[in-house]
Image: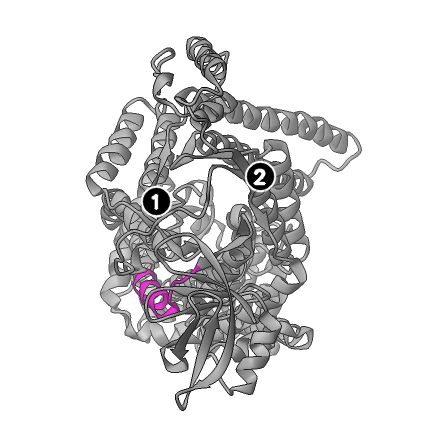
Amino acid sequence: MRALLFDGLTSRARAVSIEFEMLEGRLGLAIRGHRGLLAVAVSDLVIGERVGDTNRHLGLPDGSSLEVLENQAFDRALREQKLRTAEAPIGFLERHWRYAAIAGVVAALFSAWLLRFGLPSLASHAVRLVPVALDARIEQDTLRLLDASVLAPSKLTQERRKQLTAVFAEVASGVQPLAQPFTLLFRTGGHLGPNALALPSGSVILTDELVALSKGDDELRGVFAHEVGHLVGRHSMRMLMQSSASALLLVGLFGDASAAASLTAAAPAVLVSSAYSRDFEREADRFSFRWLSSHGISPRHLADLLKRLPRSAEGGYASYLATHPDLQERVEAAERSSPAEK
Amino acid sequence: MATDGEIDYTQYDRGQLEEALRRIDPERYPADFQRLTAEIQKRDSHEGSPQSPRPVHRTQAYQLEFRGNTSEYFRIWIVNLALTILTLGVYSAWAKVRKQRYFHGNTYLAGSPFGYHAEPIQILKGRIIAACAVGAYFLAIRTSLKATAIVIAVIFIAGPWLLVKSRRFTARVTSWRGLRFGFKPDYGGAYRILLGWLVLSVLTLGLLLPRLTRERYRFIVSRSSYGDTSFECNPGVGRFYKTAFAVFGLAVAVVIALTLVMIPMMMFMKSQGYGSAKTTQAITTGFVFLEYALLGPLVLGYTYARNVNEVLNHTTVGQHGIESKLEASKLIGIYFVNVLGIVASLGLLIPWAQIRLARYRTAAVTLHAAGDLDEFTAQPVEPTPSALSEELSSFFNLDFGF
């Protein structure tokens, strides 16, 4: 077989011919054409991998190397001598369209499964390993950031606050708190409008706008139970874990396309994140419906409040991208879980 | 940058004079050009006399060539992707090495392919540590502002060190004709040049950024070597400013043009009764995507083509010169079609995109060899440095040039 010998000292190539032969009772590679015969025991030979149809490199013990010019013949010789390189099975898969097609299907199905079920389930278990002190840390910074940018002090009277705090305590009473006791915070929502937000480790922000929109405490009980559902499930921390892991996975999948990397990996990351977010909203809704039912309150109260949310805050447009599940869907879920009312 | 009229051509041999004549820009260096032609004429008139034998050097052009093909690489890509996903990323180190082997092994210079010799285990170790660092980074930027500030400071301070380490790794595992490439571990220079120009750029509100780009390229190329032959690199400063201003102008023009199309379109839709918030939002989103899809390839393609041309056209390896003929418009077109193809095929065309990009970028480079390419010699053998820095840089997407 034809090959080029490089001595590793200069860039000069020397044309040689190579052959596997028994040399002094051991299998060796005979190199002819440069200074007569050069023999190297196979055990001293570093046989490089062949990727695609690129030329193989063979490392010799003295630092010189061979570039094999006949891939087919050399592969055949390796087979005949029963010499296998570590990555030979991968090369076999890579050469056949059939296995490439199987690989494609496996990759698509497994990554879809991983994104949809694997990572969320992994995160729900792994979250127990994350100290709650970290949630508390994040909460402090988030609250500071929200107060500095969007939120303003509440204009509710002390009396109304006391009243609402009592309602909130009633909802939170049966639940084991995380790092700190559950607390209700009052703010003006600014452009967040009528809204309630669960911070990572125990605080719930209630905006004045939502209080104004609500009719009766049962509706607010539904909202509080929804937010407590987020807290109990540590949804913030799980969201953080899931979206980081999925971003990493997507960069692995689509990210090595050079210039297009950021664009092609960012778009699916947004889609995946919002899908996770919708899952958490549904989970919190279910928690809320369960709590309301077990306290003899109809889940329709939450649905009624949701129906009154202004369309601008939660438009029907691009529902797939929306962070919150479609309003209609949530209302229907609430009504389904209260058949007694119908 | 050399000043016009400074070069002493009497010291040059015949081959070097011819090389200089081929490469000189007579408009920029009129005095040098005049002296160069005078020197060549002087030698010509002496020709034939035994005192000045004419060296046998003749420059020969070797165009880089990429021989990989899409169908072969598609199979390699998808098999390795599947294995990477199934092993939850552990196999990615092997996948990376196979990909690099494929691209290096299919890049030919003067009939010989390049080689890639990193060990997957080395890369895996680097990747594990880098992944932990990235995890810490993500956690930091999402949990605390103070931690974010610390992380960013660490990245800036470690940046030059990482650059040197990662270039060193990449160079040491790359070979051609049995000789390895190298990178001089000039940490002092890295801090002085890269951090120095970065600080100056910040102080001048970004006005010196093109200069930083030039210094970074120059640092990377001029510390590189093939065997024991160093690269030399001295690109002009002005070209980097021209490129930066041109690309800024182009980007602004694209944004203005898109806005000029978008506003009448919205007004027309409104007049036809489609003026709801929904449609407006849909149109705006569409245009933002279009803007990204246009601006990304435009900015990257233009900057890359112009800067790399300028750098390589002023780079020499020993007495050999390099020429780069990337056309910005073609590169932009390739990037743009690649993005469209990848998005439309949900990622299946990634290997196709990578191959056509490699093919174009490779074919644009020519080595003008002044004499024999067989006479490079090796550097004393050194152990290959760890892959950690390389992995850290690529995880943090610190793209250092090439």
Residue beneath the point at 74% across and 32% down? B270
Residue beneath the point at 67% across and 57% down? B345
Q: Which residue is mark 1?
A: B225
Residue B76 in view: yes
Region of the chain picked out in magenta, as a range: B116-130
Left of B186 or right of it: where is A70? right
Query: Dot 2: what SS?
Result: loop
Percent coordinates x, y for residue A199 in the rendering: 34, 58
Q: Between residue B163 and residue A227, name the one nearer to us.
A: B163
Q: Are marks 2 and 1 on the same chain?
A: yes
> How has the structure been colored for display?
one colour
Q: Residues within 10 Å of mark 2 (few under 14, many from 20)?
A: some
Disc 1 marks a residue whose amino acid type is: Ser
Foreground label between 2 and 1: 1
Disc 2 marks a residue whose amino acid type is: Ala
Q: Between residue A17 and residue A118, name the one nearer to us.
A: A17
Percent coordinates x, y for residue A283 in the rendering: 48, 70
- Residue B157 in the magenta stretch? The answer is no
The answer to whether A79 is drawn above or below residue B175 in the figure is below
Q: Which mark is residue A127?
A: none
Q: Which residue is mark 2?
A: B364
Percent coordinates x, y for residue A278 in the rendering: 52, 63
Choose top left, top right, bottom left or bottom right for residue A320.
bottom right
Q: Residue furthest bottom?
A: A25
